[in-house]
Structures are given as C-alpha cells and as structure tokens.
Amino acid sequence: MGRFAIRHAALAAALACASFGAQAALFEDDEARKAILDLRQRVEAMREGTNQRIADENGQLRRSLLDLQSQIETLRSDMARMTGQNELLTRSVSELQQVQKDVDERMKKSEPSTVAVDGREFTADPREKAEFDAALGVFRSGQFAQAQTAFASFVKAHPQSGYNPSALFWLGNAQYATRNYNEAIANFRSMLSLAPDHAKAPEAVLSIANCQIELKDTKAARRTLEDLTKAYPQSEAAQAGRERLARLK
C-alpha cells in the first residue's frame, strides 16, 4: 500500500506538471498569435499608408503633368500667334520696302539727270530726253515730215532745253529733206546763234549754203561757203564747202 500510494502521488504530480506545461504552452501560442496579428496589422497599415502616399503622390504628379501640359499648350499657342504676327510684320515690311522702291524709281525717273548730246553736257529731265530721242528716231527712219513736226513741237515745248541746238539742227535737216528751204535756213541760223561752238555748227553752215543753192541764190551760197571756210577752217564741212565753192565759180 505504501508503494501504491507513492506511485499514485507521483502520477498525480506528473499529471499536474503536464497540465501546467500544457497551459503554459497554450498561453505562449496565444501570445505568439497576437503578436503575429499585431505585426500583420502594422504591416497592413504601413502598406495602406504607403499605397495612399503613392496614390497621393501619383495624383499630385498627374496634376503637375496636366498643369505642365496646359502651360506647354499655352506657350505653343503664344508662339503660333507670335509667329503669325512676325510673318505679318515681315510681309508688311516687305510691302513697304517695295512701295518705297517703286516711289524711289518713279522719283528717279522724274528727276533731271546729266546727258551728253553732240559733245555737249547739260541737265535734262526724263521727259525731254524721251521726246528728243523719239523725234530723232523718226528722222532716222526716213519719216522727215513727221520728224519736222516732232522737232518743232519739242523746241516749242522746251524753249530752254539743252537739247535745243541739236533739235534745231535736225529740224533744219528735216525741212531740207521736205524742201522747206527757207524754214530750214531760219532754223539753222537759230541753231548757230544759240550755240556757235556746237559740234554740228559747221554742218549747219554748209546746210544753209545747200539750201541757198537749191533756191538758186548762188551769190548768197558763195558768201555762206566763204564764211564757213573762215569760221571753221579745219572741219570736214569746210573742206566740202571749199569743193562746193570751187564748183560755184
């Protein structure tokens, strides 16, 4: 009995220890689970916080990108408008330059300029030059009646023109060609009175003598030829005058 009691007591003690150990292990498992759950909750909270922060940052970034895109579009619109304004300004400047060029050319065409005719230089406006050249062109084409009219009109329209000695000379020649000898003589003499040192003065004197010969005024023609050889002895016209004078004698 004694040994049985001892065994029973030992068994009871072992069961008690086992029960305590089981309770202790159960307590430790609950604590671990709580710790794990707490850790999971903290991790989840951190994940949610991180996700929210990322979402907020992404939202801010998208708003920033939208603002930047809006600014870029505004800049593009401003640049397009400025480009259009620059193109318009460039066209306006180009048009103004062309207008100024046209005005300058018109003014240049209407301004007097220095011309040289028959060895004489003088100032003439473009209209004078154009009219004289046109009349001379008519004469050279052989239309002497029309040339006579053109040169007569020129002398009347431009009485102070530097072209007048030459115009009178060609007018006299046109009249000689149309057998208006007396008128030709008058214009040759007007030319000589206006410019006795003119390059064509010797020819004008010879032409006067030719007109007088045509008019059968031999005495006047001889006197004119003598004057020619005295006034312009070295000229070709004077040489021709000497030959003509010899035939008249």
Image (spheres, helix red, strand yellow):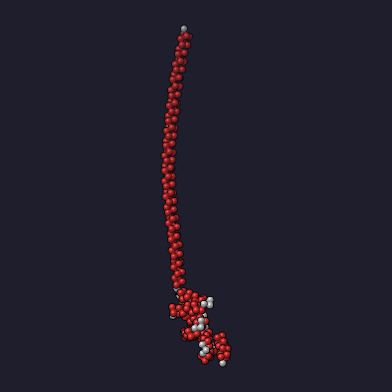
Q: Quadrant of the C terminus?
A: bottom right
Q: Residue at x 51, y 76 (%)?
A: 138
Please state which of residues 211 and 235 is positioned toward the viewer in this rendering.
211
Figure disc tally: 0
Which residue is more in the foreground, 66 or 4? 66
**Frontmost residue, 111 versus 143:** 143
Depth check: give the residue in front, 207 or 54: 207
The answer to whether 84 is drawn above or below residue 228 in the figure is above
Residue at image position (50%, 85%) is: 181
Q: Is residue 78 above or below residue 136?
A: above
Where is residue 97? Give x, y as percent.
45, 64
Compared across the picture, whether 48 is left or right of 139 comes to left
Question: Which residue is rendered at x = 41% and y = 43% of the image?
Answer: 63
Q: x, y (%) of residue 49?
A: 42, 35
Residue 205 in picture, x, y percent from top left: 51, 86
Residue 100 in view here: yes
The answer to whether residue 112 is above or below residue 197 is above
Q: Position of residue 206 (x, y in %)?
A: 53, 86
Residue 230 visible in the picture? no
